[in-house]
Image: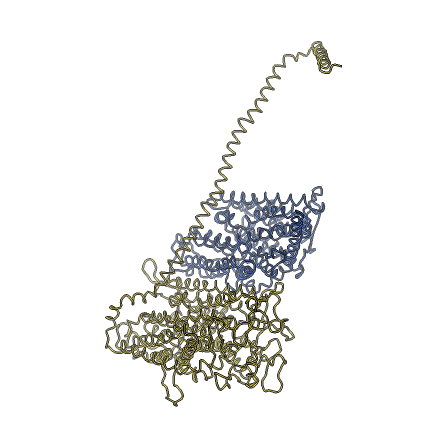
Amino acid sequence: MVGETLRNLLMIAWLLPLVGFAVEIFGGFWGSRKSRTAAWLAVGCIASGFLCSASALVIWGNANHWSVLNKQSHHSAGEHGEHDAHGEQGKGGHAAEPAPKAEHGSVSAQGPYVLTAAVEEHAAESHPAGPTVYSGTLYYLARIGSLDISLDYYIDSLTLVMFTMVTFIATCIHLFAMGYMSEELTEEYVDHNAHLSNGHHVHRPGRFYRFFAFLSLFCFSMLGLVLAGNIFQVFIFWELVGICSFLLIGFYTERKSASNAANKAFIMNRVGDFGFLIGLMVVWTFFGTFRFGETVDEKGTVVQAGLFQLIQRDETGNVVRDAESGEVIIGAHDAALTPGNSRKTIPYALLVVAGLGVFAGCVGKSAQFPLQTWLPDAMEGPTPVSALVHSATMVAAGVYLVGRFYPMFVQEVLLTIAYVGCITLFMAATIAVVATDIKKVLAYSTISQLGYMMLGLGVFGWGAGLFHLVTHAFFKSLMFLCSGSVIYGCHHEQEMPKMGGLWRKMPITAFTMLIGVIAISGLAIPGLVSWSTIFAFSGFFSKDAVVATSLAFVKANPSHFLLFLMPLLTAGITAFYMFRLWFYTFAGQPRDHHVYDHCHESPLIMTIPLMVLSVLAAFCAIGGEQGKLYLMLTGDQPAHVAHGVAAAAGGITLPGHDAIHAVHNQAGTLALIAAVSGTLIAWVLYGTNMVNVAEMKRQLAGLHGFLANKWHFDELYDGLFMQPAHIVGKFCSWIDRTVFDGIIHGSAKVVLFVSKWDRLFDENLVDGFVNLLGTSTFAVGRSLRVVQTGRLRQYVMFIVVGVVALFAILFTTFPG
Amino acid sequence: MNPEFLLSAIIFVPTLGALLLAILFDSKNSEAMRLFAFATTLVTFGLTLMLWGDFQEGAGGIQFEVAKPWIPTWNVYYRLGVDGISLPLVLLTGLVSALAMGASWSITKHVKGYLVLFLLLETGMMGVFLSLDFFLFYVFWEVMLLPMYFLIGVWGGPRKEYAAIKFFLYTLAGSVLMLVAMLMFYFNAPEADGRFNLLKLAEAATAGTLLSPSMQITAFVMLFIGFAIKLPAFPVHTWLPDAHVEAPTPISMILAGVLLKMGGYGIIRIAFPLCPYGAQYWAYTMVAIGVISIIYGAFAALAQTDFKRMVAYSSVSHMGYVLLGLAVWKINEATGEAIGSDYWQMGLNGAMFQMIAHGISSAGMFFMVGVIYDRVHHRDLNRFGGLMGRMPLYSGLSAGLFFAGLGLPGLCGFIGEVFVVLSTWNYSPVLAIISASGVILTAGYILWAMQRVYLGAEYKGPHAEDLTPINTRETSIASVLLALAIVFGIFPAILINIMSPSVKSMAEAAQAGYEKSASQVNELQAQR
């Protein structure tokens, strides 16, 4: 019952923060503003969540005897577990091996699989125990005919690593936030950044509880996203993390800049979600299911294949297409498992559309070009939010989803992902070079690093991209917390030109920050421990993996050489701007004595998380691609990743692990050279006084202005989309008032006009005629009154005359 | 209680309440009258809940059918019944009426008249959803119109006469067309006994013996225009912003919460089953109108400066999803067979769900606008701000309800919208993409409005001293709506399980009827 245990543990970890949210928001609203209860509750929830996740990870590992960690070489024998899992599933359990397998309870064990002759041969000689995927359904949202939409879970090594990482970092950040947000523990908080019309600052009650309630809600949404077992469920939690981000960015509701930033973040994300929705529509219409994994009934038999089984790949790694039409075949290996509503084939172009659509959502969430502009503005939120939501977890959700949905992506989509990542990583790094707000530098650095992850995934480094996601989460949350510590210590000063020399005042912050800076820059010392190993912090290994993959990719597809050159160049820029930040802030002499004199180191509740995170930022990736983290993360990697994909006609080749391994050292060396150069330049410019930076800035004013204005994207979008939308809106409103109401009013006028004439007609013609008739009748009557004498003799005479006249007429008219 | 009697009770308890109110109460004792009227609506809502309890989930057909001769010479029957399509709307009517009555404490002018008309209005609405006789349906349709006219025209804002007349004439124009269609059915019904019987007429339509294909096309247009005005769909929606802006808050809640749903209900209850060929003939037009309504309404909402008008246009946009979901009926032009009929059913279910969801969220939004209007007596979006600090509970509840309108997952608005949009690709990819783009615009106008009203450093408008915290009565109304928005957002199956069997049988009957008529058309062409 491993599957059920895992499901229960992760569900507790997932739902506890929701309970926490409900209690905190109501309890806090009616409770004291000075109480820290909400914070302790939030910490308790998320820390318990971490314990559950970690236990789940251990249980999962034990269940398959840590087979993922026992792979000795990452490039040849490592990735066959999935096939084993599948192979055994057919037999319904495995007796001879210590490997616990395919569990047929309410869960199924399966891997996203490809069965090819070559792979099966490999599988036979490699480890018998393979990692397993546990999936199942929580409840149904709706069942309509043969379509059903449900909330599912899908637990594999990626889920578990993400869960553990998210809950751990969130726990650290919650603790940090208890110190950082302590100023809110008051009945009368003065917001120095919000002004009333009379120029005074805003005074308001503290909102400590609300902050932690929102953080809890965010944790719930984020964990739900990771646990999701179908793409629709991902979308649900995708939007929920979006609204949490909105609430947290706009936490200081009184500040116009904060509410603008919150709106911008949500609406730009919705632009991406529009694409996501298109992807969902295609998937839904053609596949008839949203589930990643197989659907299992109560008895444990597989009744329906999931998306990952419906797309089949041949031995070259390409999707299987119909020989005649060229459309991609939809269907599980066992035809009976294909969902009733799925069509038989999907045009290749639509598969590309589906992939690009889902990726569009990721572009929005992960702030990739062209939807990157919201993330720097999102720094309006309190710094712990920036650390948790806008660097470590939520913005990485886009990368996570690309990794999760990987089996559905075809070459064209991957190439787009690679280029988007490539453009983003370079552009954001250039802007970071000129930014002076400490958080903005980190924000652009986040965008740039997310670009690296996307690039890694795009060039077929599934493990590399996600590896960088995890290491980045640690060092970037560390650095954001350090910047938070600086901001807290300097009384909400964020401009680096006003800092300088702070290491004397805040040594712990300065030192832990330095670890983060070294980690992100990718510095390393070859041969420190032994000749064959490299001593380095986490960032080096993951960035190395990304760069090596892109080098292998470029070697296979030389026309896409930019995909290697740009990240290499940017590795240098990254080292440069990160060390610039560190030198600017902590080294040298104080530039603003007012700030410096009042500055102080943060309390222990803030510095302990820094120290814990710095240890992980430094050492979590030890061993690189033979290290435990990487092996664990890639335990369930999509099957076609290991061997690469051979180019179809006119297509591109995706490198397998062998090809990547071949260029690993070369790429690592180049990246290290770039990083060291960047570091040296930063040291020369900002660490020493050898060069006058201000003079340089003046000489390069044009370029500096262009970068400082963020490549003018804000102005561009404002002119291209915002203003037109308002104009179209006004136009629609105008049409309503003039055209449609005009027609209504016009027809009303016509009716009034007609009825006026009608009245005239009635009163004059009709009434005239009737009156005429009346008056003439009356006149005749009056004139006849003279014959009404009352004398009988006269009447008799009238009758006689009348009869005679009648007869006369009768005889003259009808003679005979 | 005998369920057949229950149906009549649901319709006429409000009338009874209105009568008692008129006879027994002194018109100076407003408080007692309000309480009595509120109790009446609560009892009615309780009765609808009892109906839900008696209702057999999973059955597609009509339940608790009542049929008594009413005007035998014309074959008019007093025929009631309920199925999975009408039950959710009956529940919604009961709920929104009770809540709107709860919101009516702000009405101080001619309280007695107001309450009597309000209760008569409820009778009309319930009657429309429960009657299965076309004539009876038509009568209730008109019954509902008159109280509404007076409620807007007497208790409304500055331009109340204009708005009331506009509302009345628009709807009346629609009813006239409906009347013509009704007569077409009457004289073509195969069985004299079932000339107004909606069930019999639908059966005949399914068998292809009601109207000829060309007549179906005409009859459908007339029915559709009548219902589209009510919905309201572009371009016959312009009565809605005026009616909403001028109507008092509770009436706005009723308008948005229930009245608009009659349009959708009429389409799915009458127009589709009685003219399946016509419906299929006009499907693309309807889908296109639905998509235009979504986008057009959203753009127009973006441009409004009047808070209530903004919410009114959001209704146009949201009801566009209803029309879109109803009409995504894809067939193979050559063979007449349905393509992906499950997707059409998903669209129908989504549309039905959207009606309920919109009933909850928009009633809530209008109520929230009303709460603030009662305090500061203006609705200019640019002269609010800072309410989050002044009225935190009110702002929090409003935020929840506006997020429900925005279509946030976990709240009811999401399910309806996303089901409809997902089912649209099967019908037309291009229109599906356009309709999906609505999510951006919706987020735009709602967030922008929220920013201007609730966020910011300070309140910028007049009567700042009147910004008192939300009171218990108001809190309760808003909380009930928000709680329902959450429940239906997380467990949509509660409603879908009621609806989907009835929707399925309607869709299958319509498909069969279409195929019959289509084969008639083919025969005619072959003869030529």
Q: Quadrant of the N terminus of chain A?
A: bottom right
Q: Name the quadrant containing residue B46.
A: bottom right
Would residue A464 be seen by someone viewing this image from the given angle? yes
- Residue B44 point in image, percent of width and height: 61, 54
Colouring style:
by chain
The residue lying toward the viewer, choosing from A75 and B318, is: A75
- Residue A203 point in image, percent of width and height: 36, 63
**The chain shown in yellow is which?**
A
The residue lying toward the viewer, choosing from B363 and B303, is: B303
- Residue B83 point in image, percent of width and height: 65, 56
**Residue under the image location 50 percent in, 39 percent down:** A748
- Residue A740 point in image, percent of width and height: 48, 45
Above or below, A523 relative to A778:
below
- The colour chain B appears in is blue
Q: Name the quadrant containing residue A613.
A: bottom left
Tell me: B430 left or right of A558: right
Would residue B153 be seen by someone viewing this image from the given angle? no
Which residue is situated farthest in the right direction here?
A: A816
Above or below, B88 relative to A238:
above
The residue lying toward the viewer, choosing from A216 and A480, is: A480
Q: Name the quadrant containing residue A780.
A: top right
Above or below, B313 relative to A522:
above
**Residue under the image location 70 percent in, 49 percent down:** B67
The residue lying toward the viewer, choosing from A611 and A278, is: A278
